Image: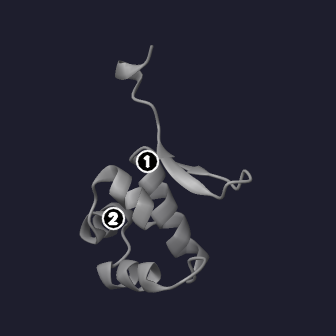
Amino acid sequence: MKAARALLGWSQSDLARASGISEPTIKRLESADGDIGGRAATGDAICTALETAGVIFVSENGEGAGVRLKKDPRNAG
């Protein structure tokens, strides 16, 4: 979640506004080690907000899971 926010230049407040999840919840989830806990609906709302803003979640591919930004079609090719 932190890496996705960093790619977007978002603060925890920005993610809270975009996802409809409270900022204290964002802080709590980011402070925990390992997989994000909490309710499934919370994780879904956060993922949806980040994906809508252009983040792509990359699955484990031998080098670890990660995030990247979608290509801007205005800058392609």
Point out residue 18 in the picture as x, y percentages from the top left corner: 33, 60
Tell whether 53 sits left or right of 68.
Answer: left
Point out residue 73 in the picture as x, y percentages from the top left corner: 41, 23
The residue at 38%/77% (across/down) is 26
Point out residue 21 in the picture as x, y percentages from the top left corner: 38, 74
Residue closest to the far front: 63
Seen in the picture, residue 66 relative to 25 is either above or below; the reply is above
Tell whether 44 sits left or right of 50.
Answer: right
Label drawn at residue 15 = 2
Residue closest to the far top: 77
Seen in the picture, residue 29 relative to 53 is either above or below; the reply is below
Q: Secondary structure at mark 2?
A: helix
Question: Closest to the observer: 16 or 58?
Answer: 58
Q: Secondary structure at mark 1?
A: helix
Locate the C terminus by quadrant: top left
Question: Closest to the observer: 8 or 61?
Answer: 61
Tell whether 6 sits left or right of 70.
Answer: left
Point out residue 30 in the picture as x, y percentages from the top left corner: 43, 78
Q: Look at label 1 and name its amino acid.
A: Thr
Q: Look at label 2 and name its amino acid.
A: Leu
Label drawn at residue 29 = none
Of pointers 1 and 2, the one earlier in the residue sequence? 2
